Amino acid sequence: MKIIMFGPPGVGKGTYSSRIAQKLGIVNISTGDIFREHLDRGTELGRRIESYMKKGKLVPDEIVANIMRRRLTQKDCEGGFILDGYPRTVTQAMALEDEKIDVIITLIVPDEILIAKCVARRICKDCGEIYNILNLDRTIEDVRYVVPSMSPQIEKKCDKCGGGLIQRIDDNPQMIKTRLEIYREQSKPVVKYYHGRIQFIEINMTGAVNLMVNVIMEKLTPILNKL
Ligand code: ADP
Ligand code: ZN
């Protein structure tokens, strides 16, 4: 099964991709994680993408497509994969054409919540595990969003590896707004591009992570069974 996890910054693509990948026994590939690793290691690629990432802008299509082309030929992709954060432009979607994607899952929540969630996001500097210190309970346009915080057991320490938790440099209100604009202008057209080509799942992320994982799996299972 080949899945695209799609949605605006802060909606939870990373969290849900890793959980669903684990359930399905397939590999989870996050372009954001790949890029952050290059930044941390100070590689040649890291130096090329640094200015884009620090401004909350998209890394140029050519660079992303090259990296992903190589990544997707690795052995662990043979059983299928989830793409978290790719494709993010129509050009990238076209570059992925050969891969025969089965389904695109779009996660949605109102902007107001996205901004609050990004600001409260924390990640492990060592293993990349995602946490969120926001205890969300808000009603927007008659829809109630209740998402308990995903805080670590010990403050500022990763449950998985004991690493320190940090905030991403692009998770500040100003840059989140930039990223949301870019999402609307450059990434949203990807959904239109796939319309009529592959299966669609769209989910309003109103509840806790475990609950929403079940909702996604319920929608995914009939599609899986037909493959
Ligand atoms: P988010 O979805 O919260 O913005 P990601 O971790 O997916 O976070 O991405 C972080 C940054 O990495 C983006 O703002 C962008 O600079 C870069 N990036 C990730 N994926 C892509 C992509 N497919 N195309 C271009 N840039 C990307
Ligand atoms: Zn960790």
Image (cartoon, rainbow, N blue to C red):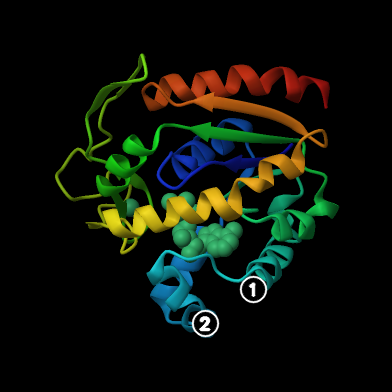
The answer to whether residue 33 of the structure is visible from this angle is no
- The quadrant of the image that shows the N terminus is top right
| In the image, the residue with mark 1 has its CB under 8 Å from the nearest atom of ligand 1 | yes
Residue 63 disc label? 1
Residue 169: x percent and y percent? 31, 64
Marker disc for residue 48: 2
Left or right: 128, with 150 as reference point: right
Q: Please tell me how crowded label 1 is: few (under 14), some (14-19), or many (20+) other residues with Cα within 10 Å.
A: few
User: Mark 2 is on which residue type?
Assistant: Arg
Q: To which quarter of the image does residue 4 belong?
A: top right
Say if 99 sits above or below 141 in the image: below
Task: State yes or no: Cβ of the residue under disc 2 lies below 8 Å from any atom of ligand 1.
Answer: no
Is the C terminus in the top left, top right, bottom left or bottom right quadrant?
Answer: top right
Residue 60, above or below 110: below
Question: What element does badge 1 sit on?
Answer: helix
Is 94 on the left or on the right of 56, as rendered? right
Labels 1 & 2 near each other (Cβ < 8 A): yes
Three-letter amino acid code of the residue under disc 1: Ile
Q: Residues within 10 Å of mark 2 (few under 14, many from 20)?
A: some
